[in-house]
Amino acid sequence: MSRKPVVLVTGANGEMGHGLIHRLANHNGFDILALDIRELDADIAPLCVATIVGDILDRRLLERLVSEFEIHAIFHLAALLSTRAEFTPETAHEVNVQGTLNLLGLAVEQSRWHGQQVKFLFPSSIAAYGLPTLDAKHEAGRVIENDWNMPTTMYGCNKLYCEHLGRYFTHHYRQLAAESDLQGVDFRSIRFPGLISAFTLPSGGTSDYAPEMIHAAAQGQSYTCFVRADTRIPFMAMPSAIGALLDLMNAPAEALSTHVYNIGSFNPSAGEFAELVRGIFPDADINFESDTKRQAIVDSWPEDVDDTLARQEWGFRPRYNLTQAIEDYLLPNIRQRYT
Ligand code: AKB
């Protein structure tokens, strides 16, 4: 009985899953197996060869996947984001860490079956950083991958640890076994900044204020921003993020010196972003009322990232700078969405 060769996307119904599935199906011609805890939205379900509603913590479900599909790459997007994770840290740890462990195990299992490495694409985050004070944040400026890895959130700790798990599975998994599984998994990860999509709104993150601000303005709703106007972290338009994930996937292994890469695009302060939004939606009613606790999380994230490695090793270039992101991507698509 032959099994169907596919690319598995977990968290397929989330923000990034939507964009990724469109790109994978329309430009790359992959057969997609989509997994999500919720039923897949009608716009992306037809783009997949199979959709499964289920939990990445359900090992039986994952075993069933092994018997039905031949998985050659995994985009493991399912996660509880930083704000939501702080309400239920233990659950977040299970979903974010145990879920990733289960998927890495599935990748090893799959590579045993078809004899090829399974590429494992993992969206990490600027939440993996933790800067202790605002002064340290300003002084640090553009941070490199290995500096300031002291996250203050469960989500950030989970992401940082999963980056290490991926490295472990690629190079050291079962290193003492007579026949080791070395090289079964090819783990590649990007530390994403806050993402802004024209088509979907994030839920449960702490960088959500920027997308929320522009989507609220487009709908004529007032918005109270939960961080100070001078708050600065890096952001990126969703198509740049999806493009980067695919570029990293396609990069030749010999070109890569590490498993984890920063990428950046623009980093306006919340106040500067509000000004830009007011520039395109003159009636936008945006106020600032800092929520001390969520503010502290964003203050611990870097104000910018150094993405030299990604640029040098696999040719990363953001598709949009801030002006292009607003004028060419966000504005036309958001307008169309709400009219
Ligand atoms: C969040 O806010 O939790 C995410 C992230 C920065 O990874 N958007």
Image (spheres, grey):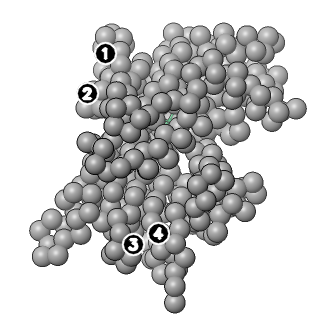
Mark nearer the viewer, 2 or 4: 4
> Is residue 52 positioned above or below 89 on the image?
below
> Is residue 147 positioned above or below 40 on the image?
above
Label 4 to label 1: alpha-carbon separation: 41 Å
Label pair 3/4, CB-CB below 8 angstroms: yes
Label 2 to label 4: alpha-carbon separation: 35 Å
- Identity, as a three-letter code, of the amino acid under mark 4: Ile
Question: What is the secondary structure assignment of the residue under circle 3?
Answer: helix
Q: Mark 1: is the Cβ under 8 angstroms from ligand 1?
A: no
Give me the disc on residue 71. Answer: 4
Label 3 to label 2: alpha-carbon separation: 34 Å
Label 2 to label 1: alpha-carbon separation: 9 Å
Q: Which of marks 2 and 1 is nearer the N terminus?
A: 1
Quarter of the figure with the C terminus: top right
Q: Residue at x 59, y 65 (%)?
A: 31
Q: Mark 3 points at which residue?
A: 110
Q: Which of marks 2 and 4 is nearer the N terminus?
A: 4
Give me the disc on residue 140. Answer: 1
Q: Quadrant of residue 296?
A: top left
The picture places residue 292, in percent across and down from the top left corner, at 49, 20
